Image (cartoon, helix red, strand yellow):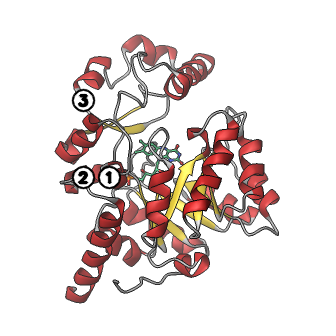
């Protein structure tokens, strides 16, 4: 057994390692959550991955039956998610340890979880939102930097983590391109209390995505990651595959001009978000055939089991820390 890595975050949840297997739409599954939590980290999944809603409650119960360790769910708190309230009520009823909110205000989630065992950490990409979360009484921040898989922020984690830490007294979890011991060590050195790893866990045996996705992650370097809003209307990082190339990663002239009209822009965003979230696999671009990943892809060379990923990351962290000049 490797030595523990103790931070404010691990102490809060009783974890061995400050590693979250980040929630990933259409990727996270119960096996990934169980394997991460059993390996000493904290497994999470987006509530929206399980529909209809009874399957979401069942997923939590299935996980609970196989691990007693802390687990988390992600709730999209944007108004377009009409299931958010139900997702929240079920998470509280089932005693989920951590709720990660994204894409909106966590106010309701924080209010309803007060006095329960459930803690709330919220995705932020800058100081303004982070301050609001702190004022609302949130328990922690997930700082999403540039280079993250999914909807990345614009600020490098090298600047974002110490900047948030300077202004806000909450545990900060670093999200973006953290894939191994070196990047974990860097994140903790910057002041993070933990890491939120997504892309690394897609290339795992437990992820049930198609093999082409895993292979694309193993083969790609950071040069192949493009940031585009063409997939779901929000800027996100994707591997430049031939399909994405065909779809085009930049807005055309007509679209750029129409985008200046706020109504059209909103319509287009909603249309793309709907297509990505609920579109059929045949629709041109959805998370099923376009692969989202972060800049850390260049450091991922093989598909491993989740326990191997956690162990390798922690081992490398300890070795590098001992060797620092
Ligand atoms: C395929 C994919 C789907 C994602 N879906 C979600 C999601 O549903 N909710 C969310 O809060 N974050 C989502 N994210 C972001 C991750 O939770 C995490 O912050 C990010 O992957 C960290 O960056 P990394 O991939 O470079 O490790 C997604 C990321 C990826 C790669």
Q: Evaluate whether residue 166 shows in this view.
A: yes
The disc, 1 or 3, on the residue closer to the chain's N-terminal end is 1
The disc placed on residue 241 is: 3
- Residue that lies at the very extreme toward the top in this rendered image: 254
Image location of residue 241, percent across then percent down: 24, 29
Q: Secondary structure at mark 2?
A: loop
Query: Is the residue 163 above or below the residue 252 in the image?
Result: below
Q: Earlier in the sequence, mark 3 or mark 2?
A: 3
- The residue wearing badge 1 is 204
Q: Tell me the CA gap for discs 1 and 3.
A: 20 Å
80 vs 35, nearest the viewer: 35
Which residue is rendered at x = 65% and y = 47% of the image? 58
Residue at position x 42%, y 82% in the image: 5
Q: Are marks 1 and 2 in contact (CB under 8 Å)?
A: yes
Which of label 3 and label 2 is nearer to you? Answer: 2
Q: Residues within 10 Å of mark 1 (few under 14, many from 20)?
A: many
Look at 41% across and 16% down and name the residue there: 282
1 and 3 marks in contact (CB < 8 Å):
no
């Amino acid at each position: 057994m490797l030595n523990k890595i103790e931070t404010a975050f691990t102490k809060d949840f009783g974890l061995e390692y400050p590693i979250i297997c980040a929630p990933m739409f259409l990727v996270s599954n119960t096996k990934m959550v169980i394997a991460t939590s059993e390996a000493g980290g904290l497994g999470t999944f987006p509530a929206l991955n399980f529909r209809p809603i009874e399957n979401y409650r069942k997923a939590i119960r299935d996980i609970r039956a196989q691990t007693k360790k802390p687990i988390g769910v992600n709730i999209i708190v944007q108004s377009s998610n009409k299931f958010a309230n139900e997702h929240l009520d079920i998470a509280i009823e089932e005693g989920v340890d951590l709720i990660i909110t994204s894409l909106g205000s966590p106010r309701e989630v924080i209010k309803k979880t007060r006095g329960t065992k459930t803690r709330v950490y919220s995705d932020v990409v800058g100081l303004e939102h982070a301050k609001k979360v702190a004022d609302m009484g949130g328990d922690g921040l997930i700082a999403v930097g540039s280079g993250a898989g999914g909807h990345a922020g614009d600020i490098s984690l090298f600047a974002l983590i110490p900047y948030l830490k300077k202004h806000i007294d909450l545990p900060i979890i670093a999200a973006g391109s953290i894939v191994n011991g070196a990047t974990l060590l860097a994140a903790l050195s910057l002041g993070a209390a933990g890491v939120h790893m997504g892309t690394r866990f897609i290339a795992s045996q437990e992820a049930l995505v198609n093999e082409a996705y895993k292979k694309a992650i193993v083969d790609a370097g950071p040069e192949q990651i493009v940031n585009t809003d063409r997939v779901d209307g929000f800027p996100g990082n994707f591997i430049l595959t031939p399909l994405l190339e065909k779809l085009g990663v930049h807005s055309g002239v007509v679209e750029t001009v129409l985008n200046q009209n706020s109504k059209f822009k909103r319509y287009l965003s909603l249309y793309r978000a709907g297509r990505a979230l609920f579109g059929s696999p045949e629709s041109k671009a959805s998370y099923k055939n376009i692969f989202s990943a972060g800049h850390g892809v260049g450091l991922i060379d093989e598909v491993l089991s989740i326990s191997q990923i956690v162990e390798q990351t922690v081992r490398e962290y300890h070795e590098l820390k001992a060797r620092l000049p």
